[in-house]
Amino acid sequence: MTFTDSSAQPNVLARRSAKRAKQLLLPGLLGLTLAISGITTAQAQETLRAGGTPSGIPFTFLDVQTNEITGAMVDVINAVGEDMGYEVTVQESPFNALIPSLTSGKIDIISAAMLKTPKRAEVVAFSDDIYPYGEGVIIKDDFSGDITNLEDLEGQVIGAQVGTTYVRQLEETGLFPEIRNYDTLADMMRDVSLGRIVAGVGDAPIMSYQLNQGRFSDLKLAEDYDQQMVGHIGLAVAQDNTELLDQVNASLAKLKGDGTLDAIFDEWGL
């Protein structure tokens, strides 16, 4: 006859039950873990993080009603992202922080009113041309005299937006005793309106849009000014991200061909 320790039997049964439950539970937990991991990876792969400025009306600017960045270049990157199969998120950034944000990996692409220049191309890789761009000179309505070139403003205190190519180009002329830097074009235009500076040099499309929206009614763009810093804006990616750049250029070519880009700029009065 075999005797069993009745006091140990419940412990054995309990251990067997726990082991069986673990065996049944592990596949489910493993599947759930893999599913969550897969979703996270897919989301990371399918999301394109774009950088845009809050003050570059109408290309990129902060919509105070939605508290989101909007504008023509936001519509462009959304169209490009959709064509490539990405979900696009737009992160707010001051203009002079866009390139550092890209090179540090905080964003994947710059979609703003950024001119393609050789100096910038040493740090980032630009897409094909998107929109022709040039500078304008903003002055008061009662400004006396004609402005056809920068020499007509020699000796005056003028302004420009920090981080733009205009600052360096204006400094290199040696024409101006002081060039004041502003965080936004709106700040610069306000100082022209208040008489703190005689004129401001900045992105002609952006200043024209602000005037057309009824802002700064006492200002105007110098009508006879001959642009000297004309270029093109483009999207920008990290220099080593050639795969993304190729995708972007392929989508841009498609969107140019079917009229999508023209429709976007027409909608924004450009």
Image: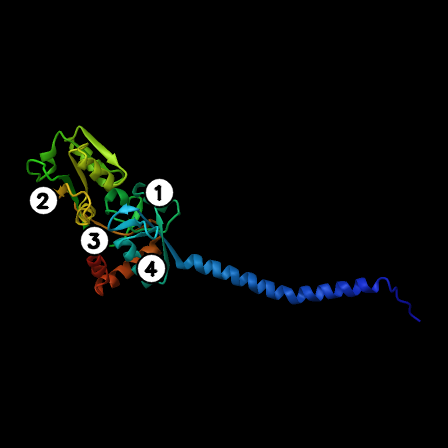
The residue under the point 30% across, 60% down is 79
Residue in the foreground of this view, choosing between 74 and 26: 74
User: Does dot 1 land on a helix, a strand or a loop?
Assistant: helix
The mark total stands at 4
Identify the residue under disc 4. 81
Disc 1: which residue: 100
Q: In this view of the protein, which residue sits in the foreground, 260 or 211?
A: 211
Chain-order first, disc 1 or disc 4: 4
Q: In this view, does 259 lie above or below 98?
A: below
Q: Do the residues labelled 1 and 2 touch (CB within 8 Å)?
A: no
Q: Are marks 1 and 4 in contact (CB under 8 Å)?
A: no
Q: Which of marks 4 and 2 is nearer the N terminus?
A: 4
- Crowd around label 3: few <14 · some 14–19 · many ≥20 (10 Å): some
* Quadrant hosting residue 168: top left
The residue labelled by disc 2 is: 223
**Mark 1 to mark 2 CA distance (whole Å):** 36 Å
Q: Which amino acid does label 4 sit on?
A: Gly
Is residue 139 visible to us here? Answer: yes
- The crowding category of the residue bearing disc 1, from other C-alpha atoms within 10 Å (few below 14, some 14 to 19, many at least 20), is few
